[in-house]
Image (cartoon, coloured by chain):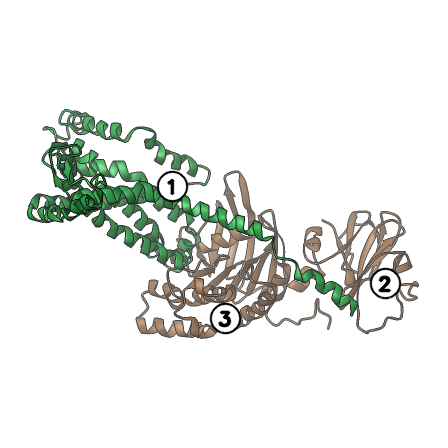
Chain colours: A brown, B green
Amino acid sequence: MKSLGSIRRDFAPWNDPNAKPYIQFDKVTKKFGDFTAVNNLSLTIFEREFFALLGASGCGKSTLLRMLAGFEEPTAGRILLDGQDLRGIPPYKRPVNMMFQSYALFPHMTVEKNIAFGLKQERMPGSDIEKRVAEMLKLVKLEQFAKRKPHQLSGGQRQRVALARSVAKRPKVLLLDEPLGALDKKLREETQFELMDLQQELGLTFVVVTHDQEEAMTMADRIAIMDKGEVMQVATPAEIYEAPTSRFVAHFVGNVNMFEGKVAEHTANATRITGATGAEIVVDNGGKAAAGSDIVFAIRPEKIKVSSKKPADAVNALEGEVYDVAYLGDMTVYHIKLDDGQIVRASALNASRVTEDPLTWNDRAWVSFRPDAGVVLTR
Amino acid sequence: MTNIAVTAAPLSAPPAALPARLAKGFVNRLVIIIPYLWLLFFFLIPFIIVFKISLSQTAISMPPYTPVLDFSDGISGFLAGFRELNFDNYTWLTQDALYFNAYVTSLIIAAISTMLTLIVGYPIAYGMARAPATIRPTLLMLVILPFWTSFLIRVYAWIGILKPEGLLNQLLMSLHIISQPLVILNTYTAIFIGIVYSYLPFMVLPLYSSLEKMDYSLVEAAEDLGCPPIGAFWKITFPLSLPGVVAGCLLVFIPAVGEFVIPDLLGGSQTLMIGKTLWNEFFSNRDWPVSSAVAVILLLVLTIPIMFFQQAQAKAQEQGR
């Protein structure tokens, strides 16, 4: 069975028409004066989903999160949580908790007091609070730091305290605003997996805001790519990467080569595309674009093969010369200047230590790819 | 091998030239010496003179106290004068209840005024710190603006407001809120009004600086965790603004204890404060030694809160904030 990407997914309520949405943004607009931060946005998130809002700074993703937490009210539209309209409910009455980008740990309280803060507001009995705090400290492996103040902790430890504090009340939804933004690269990678484990263990719904595509790809069940207050695409990481629906998304996530062209004709199971300079590309998923319409063919670098001779069985092969080569260890990146002047980026995995077909600067070279290697974009 | 030798050479770079380092050390010390010299000449030496006068006796002479220590009679004359010094004036202060009452009243008035200033100043500072960043400098300017006018004139203006036929009474009577003019001038109430008005900027500025520094997401975090806004204020905002509260209170309390102008102009003859007592002792009685003793005791009384202040500051710094 063929599947996009490398992971088979058992958790996919978004494909189930009977699944009940948990969080619903219904035509939500948020304006700050003249500036529209979120524009008529609709979005559905399911229970126990790890959902990521991905976008550049200023795209409205944090505003969306803050509206869910109750710090901002939508200018128009509704936000529903488990069927309940959240309008007018103040932050301290919402069953959601947020982990702040700055962590927002109370500097005058110890680690355990920070974690206990939310529980005390609930008027939970003292012995239960103690038990829950101990449980949370164990969960984030900070038992021996219970009596420390936040300024006596490292960045990674503070991040874990913030996490423990925000999940201590067992919220229906945990909101995470750039949760790993302040950590260094190595710690960030470790923590990504810790967060995923934690989400599985607690069975909570996570909504995370991030500008780091790798972070979103690693952790999320689904990603919403945002731009200028609008959602460009909502899909699984594999769909976002392998089947982007727009140039923006294709460009935003990973590297991509774009070929401008026109749909020449549709045949039974293939579409012929004529490039701007006359080169032809045949794809088997040209789908919806009408014959004669302007389109863009997008293909990822690792799906392009580079060789010194034209491969005999190639459906799509374009000739050019090697413009740049970068050896990165695990792979080699080629920039091939096609004869029509376009530069194509191709990457080859260095699966063996020696290569049969070495290429260097200014060599003649062919780039080839399968008919299902790229996507046709109409917008 | 030769490679290693070549790369090793620049590692042992010669230390910075010695004279340059000495010159830098000298400049650093000079910078520290200037304030110390200032304190020596304009605080410590005058204080020693005042302290010496407080150990002398009054006399009808110029200056009005004996003995005047000088070396014109040689060392033996100096020592003879030195032996005449004693703590009689301090004993005198304990025997006359007037002084004790004046000190206690001053401390109480200063403490109440400090509380009132805090109550009035906190909302102002909070409002300023939460105002849009673009208008904060203007608000700050407005707080400092009264300093452009003489302190004396501003206190004098309050006489015009508070007196029986003054602006306040005229306003209240024209609004038919009162039928008889309120007696505010020449009471302790007038002193409180004067002190709160005059010292408000000294309270607002340190409060503002500590509130403005505070990360507002802490309050949002508290609300997010289920704490209503009023609770979040008392559990988060107020404790975190304590360094500002302490600084502001000391900046108001310390000068308020020794305040002379406000009780003299607004408090009339019925009110008792140590600053006024000191002035009377000095200018009316011309008893320099006793007034010096009053001043020395006042300084001691005030040194204690300053020490508390410094301790609080050191503690805040140790917390790294």
> Which image quadrant is residue A52 in?
bottom right
The one nearer the camera, A219 or A265, is: A219
Vertical placement of residue A130 versus A33, above or below: below
The quadrant of the picture occupied by the N terminus of chain B is bottom right
Q: Secondary structure at mark 2?
A: strand
* Disc ID at residue A372: none
Q: Amino acid at mark 3?
A: Gly
Residue on which disc 2 sits: A306
Say yes or no: labels 1 and 2 on the same chain.
no
> Which image quadrant is residue B117 in?
top left
Q: Within 10 Å of the Cα at label 3, are there few (<14), some (14-19), or many (20+) other Cα atoms?
A: some
Between the residue at mark 1 and the residue at mark 3, the CA separation in whole angstroms equals 44 Å
Say yes or no: labels 1 and 3 on the same chain.
no
| Residue A168 image offset from top left, x and y in percent | 42, 68
| Residue A353 image offset from top left, x and y in percent | 82, 73
Q: Secondary structure at mark 1?
A: helix
* Disc ID at residue B128: 1
Q: Amino acid at mark 1?
A: Met
Q: Answer left or right for A294 relative to B137.
A: right
Residue on which disc 3 sits: A203
Q: Residue at x 31, y 65 (%)?
A: A123
Residue B40 in view here: yes
